[in-house]
Image: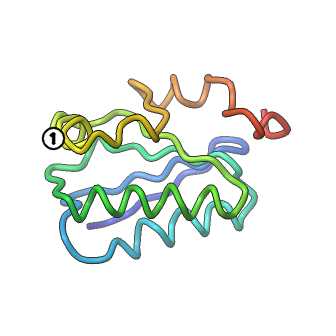
């Protein structure tokens, strides 16, 4: 899996590409941590280019969420591929994430509560 990061103002858009399966997702977690360390308190994961996800990949998303929140940031999901949407629904973890249809919608949205200073 390759991970691309783009800054849009104070928001980091992190886009993993490929398969998000098994094994530790260090690249994803490290990309989220690096974005927050660089000053982005809001991180949007653009998941439109994830071709496949399994329970290990879901764990990687939860780990990225935990990394963001422990460092004082927030993490939202955007542009879910059908496979990601299905896996999140099946795992019943969709409720812990703020999910947006598109990256632009995520960027335009109000920051989660407690993150208003970054608006």
Q: Position of residue 99 (x, y in %)?
A: 43, 31
Residue 13 versus residue 116: which sits nearer the camera?
116
Q: How is the image coloured?
A: rainbow
**Quadrant of the snapshot with the N terminus:** bottom left
Residue at 78% x, 32% y is: 119
Residue at 40% x, 72% y is: 27
Position of 46 with respect to 9 (left or right) is left
Residue at 15% x, 40% y is: 83
The residue under label 1 is 83
Q: Seen from this angle, which residue lies furthest right?
A: 117
Q: Position of residue 59 (x, y in %)?
A: 32, 62
Q: Position of residue 32 (x, y in %)?
A: 54, 62
Residue at 31% x, 66% y is: 2
Q: Position of residue 45 (x, y in %)?
A: 45, 47
Q: Secondary structure at mark 1?
A: helix
Residue 112 versus residue 5: which sits nearer the camera?
112
């Amino acid at each position: 899996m390759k991970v691309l990061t783009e800054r849009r103002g104070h928001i980091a858009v992190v886009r993993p590409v490929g398969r998000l399966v098994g094994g530790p997702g260090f690249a994803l977690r490290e990309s989220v941590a690096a974005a927050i360390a660089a000053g982005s308190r809001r991180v949007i994961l653009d998941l439109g280019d994830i071709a496949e996800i399994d329970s290990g990949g879901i764990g990687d998303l939860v780990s990225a969420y935990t990394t963001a929140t422990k460092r004082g940031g927030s993490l939202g999901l955007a542009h879910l591929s059908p496979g990601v949407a299905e896996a999140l629904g099946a795992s019943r973890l969709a409720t812990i994430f703020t999910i947006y249809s598109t990256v632009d919608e995520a960027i335009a949205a109000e920051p989660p509560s407690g993150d208003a200073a970054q608006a």
